[in-house]
Every structure is written in C-alpha cells, then in structure tokens.
Amino acid sequence: MIPRKSICIPATPPADIADFLPIVEHPHFQRLRGRRQLGINYLVFPGAVHTRFEHTIGVLALTQRLCRIQRLPADESRLLQAFALLHDIGHGPFSHQIEPVLQGDHHSCGIRRIHDMHDAIKACGLDDDDIAAMLTGGNPLANWISDRNLGTDKLDYLMRDALHIGFHGTPDIEKIQFYTLFTDDGLAIEQKFIEDAKQLQKFYSYLHQHGYLNKTALAAQRMLQRAVQQELETEDNAGDTLWDMTDNQLEAWLAAVRHPIAKKLEEALRNRFLYKTFLALKPAGYAYVERQADKPLTVHEWPRANLRAFSEFAQAPQNLIALEDEIAASCGCAAGDVLFAAMPYFKKLIPKDLRVFSCSRRQQDFWLLENDKDHRKSLESDYLRTFAIRLVAPPKLREKLSQESDHIENIILNAININQPTTTKDAP
C-alpha cells in the first residue's frame, strides 16, 4: 500500500504516519526533536547530531516492514507501530548520559508521558494502558521492538548510530528481519543465518567499544554529569525538573550556573576543552592495549574483582564526587580537576544470548552463546581489551597527576574497601 502521509529519513523506507498523526503532533513527541540520540558524543563524532525523533521514526519504518513480513493481524500491527513511536518517549536531555544524576529514569517517565498522551493515543484508536504495558514488559508482543538482539529498536539504532558516527560494516538488517521468528523464548533467528546474527552481535560490541564508550566521549560525559550534579546542589534540586528539557534547554540552564565547579566545566565543554586520561586501570593482562606513546599517561592492571567493586561503588553519584575531590585535594589540585571516565562493568555490555531455530524438525532449537563458546569468548575478549576505568584531568595537569598514580590508586582501593595487595603492574 502506498503511504498516505510519510516521513523520509536516512537509511530506512519511508515511514507512514497517517494513522498516528495525533501522537506524532503531540508536544511530548515533538520534543524528541531536541534530544540527541547520542547526547554529548557529538563533541567527538561531529555527525552524531541525529535525534530521538529521527531514531523513533526509523523504528516505526522497520516495524511497519516487520508487520508486512510477519503478516501480523491489523490490531497487533497498529499496537506495535504505536509502541514503536512511543518506546523512547520518556527520555530526557542527553538521554542515558545524564540519567545517573537526575531523579527517576526514562521508563517511569515514559509511563507518565504515555498517560499524559491519553487523548492523542485514543484518537489513534488505541488505549494508553495497552501501550504502557508494552513499555513495562506486560505484553510479550513488545519483544518485536524491545528484544536486545533482533528488536526493531536495536536494529535501527545500530544502523543509524553507525551511519551518523561514520562507522562501516552494518549487518544486513532487512535479511535479519526476514528470518526472525517469534517463539516462546522470545525472538529467534533461523539457523541458516546464524553467521548474520553473530555479525550483528559483534557489530553491537564494536559500536559500544569504539562509539558509545569512546574514551574522549566518556570524559565529556563525566564533565557534563559533574556540572549538572554541582548546580543541582546549589539549587537544592533533585533533578526531576530537568527531565522535560531538551538538550539546548539544559545547555542554556548550564550557561547560567552559579556553582564555580559547574561554571568551570560548562565553559570547558562549550569550548571543547576536554579532560584527558592520566591514569587508566585495565583488566589484568590487558595493559598492553592502551596506547601510551608520547603521552603523560600511566596504566595499571587490576583484577576483575576490583574493577567490579569500583563499578558498584560508582553507581552512587555522591560516592564519585567525594572520591574525585579526595584525590584532587591529596594531589594539590582544585575540586573538579580530577574526574572518573569509567566504562560500565563489561559483563553488562555483552550481548544477550540469542535463540536459534531450525526449519528442519531434525534440528533442535538452541541458545547461541551457550553453545558457541568461541563466539562468546570472542565477545568477552573484545570488552576486556577495551574496558578501563579512566581518571581524567585538564591537559596541563596530566603529567603531574600521572606521577602520583600509585598514591591515587591506593586512595581508590581504600574507598572501595579493597585492602589486600593488588596485581598492579605498569604497562611495558
């Protein structure tokens, strides 16, 4: 059927929005135009200025193609398409990057906004409670969109983010959609196309390591978080009022900050004067991966248990601020001069296991990572090579702080209650 009213965006078929105009025209949905999909990462990848709006339209386009391929009933198709449009409605400014320092999360905010859109959703012939149930996992059909391997949300953002970052090697999304099946265990891929599924997981791994968790982007992210944290303390504000802002509105809010540390970090971000790594804590056996040539940078190796302990400690924003300032003070630096640019503990980023089915009755279904040990080890090795807890500072302080690496390491170990000797080793 020819689209009656379509939106054209890069790299996907035109998305027909004729049945969903009240949703698309709602202020909550339109504000997605002002929230970048990759947040502050545009300071590292200049093309990464695409928005949650563009991504959501892309998810709708892939979902509409999916509904045709799977020949889904009209009522299921309409509900899935509406959920495709609303699956990211709860995001605030700078999306995941700012969430840790604001009150709430994008799922709970998404539920509130979906209910705010009751009239618009009803005008599309749908019920907001049904869409909210999709967001909370109350309807298994949501897997067509939210599955962490084969859902249309995942397929679109892998392809779209890579396009705007400038990465190549995106898997064949259309082929994957044609050979995906809905099972009792969620979405599954036909065994004949298992190599395409493995390529998809490897690309997910690559994009996280070198795109989303790029070391310079992580430094910029922490600078943004710390600036927001400090100003919220000045206002005695938990951050919930910031959720409805767009990226530009949050940047304007930061431009008027009163807290001296927030002001210093905001100015540095505005001028792209980004902090640099002076100490990298890498998993044991992987210090050699860090490029140190002609840099005032020290690399130490840590057991994975210590890395995990730090990651758990750092989940509390106040823990991180206190430790950053303790290190800065002990080294004769000002508060806010030392920050952590830490990756999440790597196990959280290994792709979810994937169900594989066979059209032949002689072949039983199986789980990919459970059975293909080499593929799993390859994914884990990718993250071990990339994983690091980085301490960053203004470039003029790198050499001074790098020379204090042993002292700083001991402060961190004491903070996370690790008292036993570590296997710390400088990189060759």
Image (tube, rainbow, N blue to C red):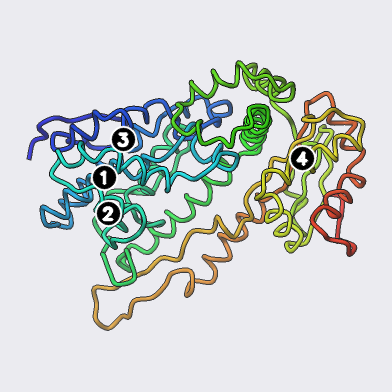
221 displayed left or right of 182: right
- Closer mark to the observer between disc 4 and disc 2: 4
Residue marked by disc 1: 62
Q: Considering the image in quadrants, where does the N terminus appear?
A: top left
Residue marked by disc 3: 11
Residue marked by disc 4: 391
The mark nearer the N terminus, 3 or 1, is 3
The mark nearer the N terminus, 2 or 1, is 1
Measuring from the top left, give residue 136's x and y in whole percent: 36, 56
In whole angstroms, how far apart are the C-alphas of marks 3 and 1? 11 Å
The mark nearer the N terminus, 3 or 2, is 3
Cβ atoms under marks 4 and 3 closer than 8 Å: no
In whole angstroms, how far apart are the C-alphas of marks 4 and 2? 42 Å
89 displayed left or right of 298: left
In whole angstroms, how far apart are the C-alphas of marks 4 and 3? 38 Å
- Closer mark to the observer between disc 4 and disc 3: 4
Residue at horizontal 43 percent and vertical 69 percent from the top: 368
Residue marked by disc 2: 177
Cβ atoms under marks 1 and 4 closer than 8 Å: no
Kind of residue at disc 1: Leu
The mark nearer the N terminus, 4 or 2, is 2
How many neighbours does mark 4 have within 10 angstroms: few (below 14), some (14-19), or many (20 or more)?
many
How many neighbours does mark 3 have within 10 angstroms: few (below 14), some (14-19), or many (20 or more)?
few
Q: Quadrant of residue 115?
A: top left
> 354 and 106: which one is in front?
106
Q: Quadrant of residue 200?
A: bottom left
